[in-house]
């Protein structure tokens, strides 16, 4: 994008992307906000297990009523 500096905010997986950006481009990261995230999300199996019903039914069943 041709920017010298950037500010980034990410939630969950977006936060992990922000950590990756900052680690590799710290000289360009002016600000970074990481919310409800982690540098490591563990093994992929639980995410695959969670993705199956989301693909079938959407995210509705994951949210409280």
Image (cartoon, rainbow, N blue to C red):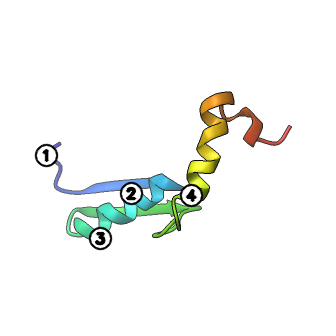
Name the residue located 33 percent from the left edge and 64 percent from the top edge. Answer: 20
Determine which of the numbered discs, if any, sits on residue 23 in the image.
Answer: 3
Q: Earlier in the sequence, mark 1 or mark 4?
A: 1
For residue 29, side relative to residue 4 (left or right): right
Q: Earlier in the sequence, mark 4 or mark 3?
A: 3
Name the residue: 44% across, 61% down.
16
Q: Is residue 26 left or right of residue 20?
A: left
Q: Reading the chain from its start, which is encountered first: label 4 or label 2?
A: 2
**Location of mark 4 (residue):** 45
* Local crowd size for mark 4, using a 10 Å CA cut-off: few (<14), some (14–19), many (≥20): few
> Which mark's residue is nearer the viewer, 1 or 4?
4
**What whole-number distance in Å separates the C-alpha atoms at marks 1 and 4?**
38 Å
Mark number, residue 2: 1
Residue that protrudes farthest toward the left in the picture: 2
SS under mark 2: helix
The secondary element bearing badge 1 is classed as loop
Split into 4 quadrants, where in the image is the C terminus? Answer: top right
59 to 33, vertically: above or below: above
Q: Are marks 4 and 3 in contact (CB under 8 Å)?
A: no
- The image's mark for residue 17 is 2
CA–CA distance between discs 2 and 3? 10 Å
Residue 9 image position (x, y, % from top left)? 44, 54
Q: How far is disc 4 from disc 2 in space, using C-alphas?
A: 20 Å
């Amino acid at each position: 994008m041709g920017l010298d500096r950037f500010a980034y905010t990410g939630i969950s997986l977006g936060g992990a992307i922000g950590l990756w950006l900052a680690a590799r481009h710290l000289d360009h990261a002016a600000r970074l906000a990481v919310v409800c995230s982690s540098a490591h999300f563990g093994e992929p199996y639980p995410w695959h297990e969670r993705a199956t019903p989301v693909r079938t039914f959407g995210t509705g069943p994951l949210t409280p009523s």
